[in-house]
Image (cartoon, rainbow, N blue to C red):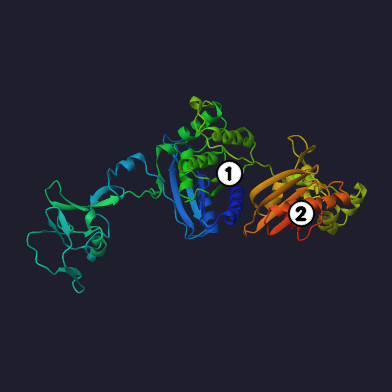
């Protein structure tokens, strides 16, 4: 969107941020990656919508180590990631350690991997004795044994006072040269970790004490600068995409799949969370999600929202290919590999504003329409509430008698003369917020029935029944009652929806809900 004016771009993003807050759960994270063009505006928008407490910070990602030249003479080698949460209690996720970081923990015991670090703190502002005097105390060493002597705290002097005589043991204090520092642990904490200490002599033959630092298996907290070779967008974005899709350049500047993986990781998402990307570009977010699912046996779902035609030329082909295998070379599976996870994929094209206008039809004759338009107050209300009430775009309940043959005029690239079927079943599922557990389609008595079962956000059990009632007579409805009586015994539900009329108690007509949800 770099061609947009500042105000147009800001309006687009601001509207998206407002909707994002409604969709983001309390444990979720919003991550937006951006270059330098609109960074300042984006920071202001996020701060305005999320507030200072829920705006988590800015990460610099080195995605182009060789640099990109600019007219101002500065070679740009990075992009930025801005983070915001929907709750002040959000906890940032960990990143896996690099191979080099793993090597820093060479030792291992029954607890886990560890490294030795000096037990004396030195260097920080709070590491001096005067800053934390209770962490300045003596330790006694005899051979390789370490113990805590008997001591009392003296408030007036702000120091520990020995309460025993020392004979053969060496007294060690956290002192380096003439500077008094502190130990890493207080006395009470150290009592439980004496076995994690060791004694050694340093290069100057001075007795020193080390403590075990265990590797946190969760990983490391993300830093404000990410500089990993895996974030290189040329190698792990452009080249990777070329290998998946073939040698042809399909998409400019795709992101490194590994940078996106780590952006998902720091969101602290569980293995069953949903990841939404409403600027998916080449589909890297889906690719990254599948790699994460492979690595931890997860079941994350991914929703992509895109308006560009490359949905068909890039995103969908990439999804199918990555579902087949992760390893590609020049558009073909590498060494015949077939190691993908597979995918249940559903993609939908939403009705556009212009198509909605094209599908509005009027009940009045053309002459009557022109006369009605002369009356200013007639236009906005009566036209839309009465004269267009059977338009397909405003939900034509008569046309819904056969839910699998509801059609709208769509733009085919040249005209609006092409008609395409609308998926009323899925549209209704979304309108009522149905989390689907089961689809069941049956041919009963020569008639098609579809049962959709699941729950809504209030955890109410929902059953939706669809059938074609076009040209049904009285006898058909009697047979329908017997069919419903038999089939509905198989479901435990709190709310029942049925399309069209039915000889049944306590159900809600699908058409009424459609009208209410879509028009109001």
The percent coordinates of residue 484 (x first, y second) are 77, 52
In the rendered image, the vertical position of residue 493 relative to residue 354, given as above or below: below
Q: Is residue 196 visible?
A: yes
38 relative position to 192: left or right: right
Image quadrant in which you'd find residue 252: top right
Camera-nearest residue between 146 and 472 = 472
* Label 2 Cα crowd, 10 Å radius (few <14 / some 14-19 / many 20+): few
Name the residue furthest left.
167
Q: In which quarter of the image is the C terminus?
A: bottom right
Q: Which of marks 2 and 1 is in front?
A: 2
Residue at the image point whose x is 61% and y is 36% from the top: 316
Asked which quadrant contains residue 496, the reply is bottom right
Depth check: 182 or 7 in front?
182
Q: Which of 369 and 434 is in front in this view?
A: 434
Q: Residue 485 carries which label?
A: 2
Q: Earlier in the sequence, mark 2 or mark 1?
A: 1
- The number of callouts visible is 2
Query: x, y (%) of residue 315?
Result: 59, 36
Distance from Cα at disc 2 to Cα at disc 1 = 47 Å
Q: Can residue 360 be seen in this view?
A: no
Residue 314: x %, y % from top left: 59, 34
Q: Mark 1 points at which residue?
A: 279
The x, y position of residue 54, in whole percent, is 49, 58
Disc 1 element: loop
The crowd level at tag 1 (other Cα within 10 Å; few <14, some 14-19, many 20+) is some
């Amino acid at each position: 969107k770099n061609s947009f004016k500042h105000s147009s771009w800001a309006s687009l993003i601001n509207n998206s941020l407002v909707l994002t807050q409604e969709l983001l759960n309390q444990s979720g994270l919003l991550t937006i990656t951006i270059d330098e063009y609109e960074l300042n505006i984006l920071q202001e928008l996020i701060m305005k919508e999320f507030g200072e407490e829920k705006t988590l910070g800015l990460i610099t990602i080195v995605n182009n180590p060789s640099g990109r030249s600019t007219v101002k003479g500065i070679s740009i080698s990075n992009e930025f990631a801005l983070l915001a949460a929907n709750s002040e209690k959000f906890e940032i996720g960990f990143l896996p350690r690099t191979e080099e970081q793993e090597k820093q923990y060479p030792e291992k015991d029954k607890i886990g991997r560890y490294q030795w670090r000096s037990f004396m703190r030195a260097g920080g502002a709070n590491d001096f004795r005067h800053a934390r005097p209770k962490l300045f105390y003596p330790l006694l060493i005899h051979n390789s044994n370490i113990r805590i002597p008997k001591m009392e705290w003296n408030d007036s002097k702000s120091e520990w006072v020995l309460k025993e005589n020392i004979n053969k043991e060496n007294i060690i204090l956290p002192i380096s040269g003439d500077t008094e520092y502190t130990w890493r642990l207080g006395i009470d904490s150290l009592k439980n970790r004496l076995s994690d200490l060791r004694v050694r002599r340093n290069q100057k033959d001075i007795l020193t004490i080390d403590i075990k630092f265990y590797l946190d298996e969760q990983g490391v907290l993300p830093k404000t600068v990410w500089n990993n070779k895996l974030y290189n967008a040329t190698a792990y974005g452009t080249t990777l995409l070329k290998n998946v899709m073939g040698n042809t350049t399909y998409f400019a500047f795709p992101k490194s799949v590994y940078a996106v993986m780590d952006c998902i990781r720091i969101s602290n998402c569980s293995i069953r969370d949903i990841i939404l990307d409403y600027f998916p570009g080449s589909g890297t977010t889906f690719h990254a999600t599948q790699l994460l699912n492979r690595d931890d046996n997860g079941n994350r779902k991914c929703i992509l929202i895109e308006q560009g035609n490359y949905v068909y030329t890039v995103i969908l082909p990439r999804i199918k290919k990555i579902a087949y295998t992760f390893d590609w070379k020049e558009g073909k599976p590498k060494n015949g590999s077939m190691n993908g996870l597979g995918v249940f994929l559903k993609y939908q094209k939403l009705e556009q504003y212009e198509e909605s206008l094209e599908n509005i039809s009027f009940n009045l004759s053309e002459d009557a329409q022109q006369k009605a338009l002369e009356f200013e107050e007639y236009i906005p209300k009566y036209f839309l509430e009465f004269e267009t009430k059977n338009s397909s775009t405003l939900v034509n309940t008569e046309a819904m008698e056969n839910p699998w043959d509801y059609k709208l005029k769509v733009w085919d690239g040249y005209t609006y003369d092409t008609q395409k079927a609308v998926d009323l079943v899925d549209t209704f599922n979304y309108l009522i917020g149905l989390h689907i557990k089961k689809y069941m389609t049956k041919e009963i008595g020569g008639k098609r029935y579809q049962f959709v079962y699941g729950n809504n956000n209030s955890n109410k059990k929902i059953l939706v029944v669809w059938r074609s009632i076009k040209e049904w007579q009285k006898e058909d409805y009697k047979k329908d009652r017997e069919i419903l009586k038999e089939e509905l015994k198989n479901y435990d539900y709190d709310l029942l929806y049925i399309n069209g009329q039915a000889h049944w108690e306590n159900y809600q007509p699908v058409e009424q809900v459609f009208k209410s949800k879509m028009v109001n």
